[in-house]
């Protein structure tokens, strides 16, 4: 018996499911929009340990009733801002070389001008953080605390003699 080659049946052309493709294109468009929002507006805020987050809303101002603990938090990108306030112990150093600001120059009781390096430890209680952000601004360290420390150091130095400040 002779063997006859068999002709395979012609392949069927596959039809493209345009309705399904349109659905995936729609998903792709929304994914690109979500990616743009994440990249440009950054709705995710990370509050580090030792800090709390204070929510500022464009319409209602600072939320005085609550703070955000450490971790990841979502914000409405254009409508909200989350300011972090350190609640762990912090130090302000007023020194000649380095530190937060330059050293304090103050006249003593005798009228001599002395330069003093000053360090102050402080801590912001978590429940007071919203009030500090509202009344003193998030830049309270340089806008409020350092000038108060300088003033207090000058006042104390003005009541003391040079020998009391530096020793005999």
Image (cartoon, rainbow, N blue to C red):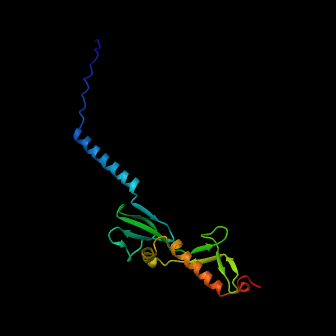
Tell which residue pokes out farthest to the front in this image. 111
Task: Determine whether, in the image, residue 31 is placed left or right of residue 104.
Answer: left
- Residue 114: quadrant of the picture: bottom right
Q: Nearer the viewer, residue 162 or 3?
A: 162
Quadrant occupied by the N terminus: top left
Task: Work out which residue is located at the far top of the displayed protein and give it.
Answer: 2
Q: Quadrant of residue 60?
A: bottom left
Instruction: State the residue in front, 23 or 94.
Output: 94
Residue 92: x %, y % from top left: 59, 74
Quarter in which the C terminus is drawn:
bottom right
Q: Position of residue 71 (x, y in %)?
A: 45, 66
Q: Nearer the viewer, residue 2 or 41?
A: 41
Residue 23: percent from the left, percent from the top? Answer: 25, 45
Left or right of 65 in this view: 13: left
Check the image and report above or below for 99 versus 19. Answer: below
Which image quarter: residue 81?
bottom left
Camera-side residue: 104 or 30? 104
Give residue 20's position: percent from left, percent from top: 24, 42
Q: Residue at x 59, y 74 (%)?
A: 91
Give left or right: position of 129 versus 1. right
Residue at 37 percent of width and 51 percent of height: 36
Q: How many marks?
A: 0
Residue at the outermost left position:
19
């Amino acid at each position: 018996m002779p063997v006859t080659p068999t002709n395979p049946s012609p392949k069927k052309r596959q039809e493209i499911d345009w309705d399904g493709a349109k659905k995936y294109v729609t998903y792709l468009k929304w994914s690109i929009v979500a990616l743009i929002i994440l990249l440009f507006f950054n709705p995710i805020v990370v509050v580090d340990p030792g800090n709390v987050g204070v929510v500022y809303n464009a319409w209602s101002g600072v939320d005085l009733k609550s703070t955000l603990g450490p971790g990841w938090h979502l914000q409405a990108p254009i409508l909200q801002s989350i300011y972090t306030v350190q609640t762990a112990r912090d130090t302000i150093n007023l020194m000649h070389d380095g530190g937060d600001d330059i050293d304090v120059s103050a006249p003593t009781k005798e009228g001599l001008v002395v330069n003093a390096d000053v360090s102050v430890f402080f801590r912001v209680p978590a429940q007071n953080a919203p009030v500090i952000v509202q009344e003193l601004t998030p830049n309270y360290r340089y806008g409020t605390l350092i000038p108060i420390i300088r003033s207090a150091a000058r006042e104390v130095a003005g009541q003391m003699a040079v020998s009391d400040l530096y020793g005999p």
